[in-house]
Image: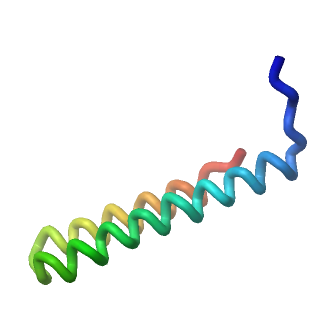
């Protein structure tokens, strides 16, 4: 049986997930920028990163 989390615990868990996903996406796009160099795909990757971060913050637990 799973124990239920309080609203504060759920929000804290969500915030950790958002921070983790944001950090990983930022690292991936930054490494891509350094490795490949700036081009059209780089701007697309930054746009995807921005949209993913905005979506994660918009979703509430």
> Left of 32 or right of it: where is 8?
right
> Residue at coordinates 50% horizontally, 63% vertically from top-left?
54
> Residue at coordinates 49% horizontally, 65% vertically from top-left?
22
> Left of 30 or right of it: where is 9?
right
> Residue at coordinates 32% horizontally, 67% vertically from top-left?
28
Residue 2, above or below 43: above
> In the image as oriented, which residue stretches furthest toward the top?
1
x%, y% of residue 20? 55, 61
> Left of 37 or right of it: where is 23?
right
x%, y% of residue 17? 60, 54
Which image quadrant is residue 37 in? bottom left
Which image quadrant is residue 41 in? bottom left
> Left of 15 or right of it: where is 45?
left
x%, y% of residue 33? 21, 79
Quarter containing the N terminus:
top right
> Residue at coordinates 40% horizontally, 71% vertically from top-left?
26
Closest to the observer, 57 or 21: 21
């Amino acid at each position: 049986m799973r124990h239920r989390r309080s609203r504060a615990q759920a929000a804290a868990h969500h915030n950790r997930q958002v921070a983790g996903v944001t950090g990983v996406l930022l690292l991936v796009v930054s490494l891509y920028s350094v490795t490949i160099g700036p081009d059209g795909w780089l701007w697309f990757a930054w746009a995807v990163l921005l949209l993913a971060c905005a979506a994660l913050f918009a979703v509430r637990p």
